[in-house]
Amino acid sequence: MRFVGIIMNDVAAVILAGGKSSRMGRDKALLPYQGARLIDRMIRVVEEIGCSTVVVSGFVDGYHCINDINKNCGPMGGIHAVLQAAIKENMPRAWLFVPVDMPAITPGLLARLSSSACAGDYDAACFENNPLPLFIKLNNHVINCLNNMELKFLSGQKIAVKDFLGNMKICRHTVSAEERPFLVNTNTPEEWHEVMKGMAS
């Protein structure tokens, strides 16, 4: 299976917004951004690259949401729940997972994960040293990895995204020094302020 020739209207996007936002002190998805909310900014970004379907992992009132099956499991809990729903409901087989707390991300960076630059027989694509955002194909190998992860969840283990990707064939895109700030997560008010200041400059 190759990423070459993937049409973005065959790709579904997921905004990962299921965390507790405990360090931020308020729901990150609802942070004000240019007169709207951060989640609206993130949805616009994925819609700009032509994703056919956009869902929210977690719960934000007024949006198509998929709740975690296994609670308090971080981003991996959201990825797991969405992919399980995709298998059961015959949803798209290509998924782009984007954290809600990465406000500086650009459409160009996200499109790169599913572009012709990712030629080859890969299961997934991400940026070097960044497991998220993540582009993943729901092929048989990925489904097997998902089933193995389910067993670990049931045994009480917590799984990081990088662990889930450990047995997959990954296309890792390089990131320039100029692009690195666009991949910064905002987990605290101080980080949010710094990213907003950088985006305004």
Image (cartoon, rainbow, N blue to C red):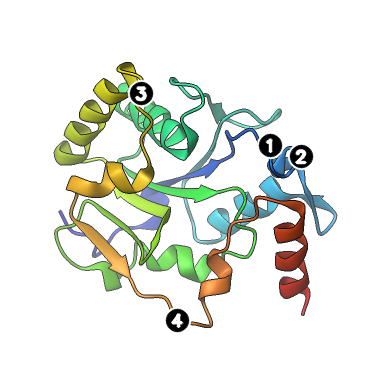
Q: Residues within 10 Å of mark 2 (few under 14, many from 20)?
A: few
Mark 3 → mark 4, Cα distance in angstroms: 38 Å
**Residue type at mark 1?**
Ser
Which numbered mark, 3 or 2, is in the foreground of this view?
A: 2
> Circle 3 sits on which residue?
89
Q: Nearer the viewer, residue 47 or 76?
A: 76
> Does residue 84 appear anywhere in the picture?
yes
N-term-proximal mark, 1 vs 4: 1
N-term-proximal mark, 1 vs 3: 1
**Residue type at mark 4?**
Ser
Contact (CB < 8 A) between labels 2 and 1?
yes
Which numbered mark, 1 or 4, is in the foreground of this view?
A: 1
> Does residue 137 appear anywhere in the picture?
no
Mark 1 → mark 4, Cα distance in angstroms: 31 Å
Q: Nearer the viewer, residue 50 or 114?
A: 114
**Residue type at mark 2?**
Gly
Mark 1 → mark 3, Cα distance in angstroms: 32 Å
- In the image, residue 134 lies at what x, y percent? 39, 53
Contact (CB < 8 A) between labels 1 and 4?
no
**Residue type at mark 3?**
Glu
- Image quadrant holding the C terminus, namely bottom right
Q: Residues within 10 Å of mark 1 (few under 14, many from 20)?
A: few
Q: Which mark is residue 176?
A: 4
Q: Which mark is residue 52?
A: none
Mark 4 → mark 2, Cα distance in angstroms: 32 Å
> Circle 1 sits on which residue?
22
N-term-proximal mark, 3 vs 2: 2
> Circle 2 sits on which residue?
25
The residue sitting at 35% across, 39% down in the picture is: 92
Mark 3 → mark 2, Cα distance in angstroms: 35 Å
Q: Quarter of the image holding residue 105?
A: bottom right
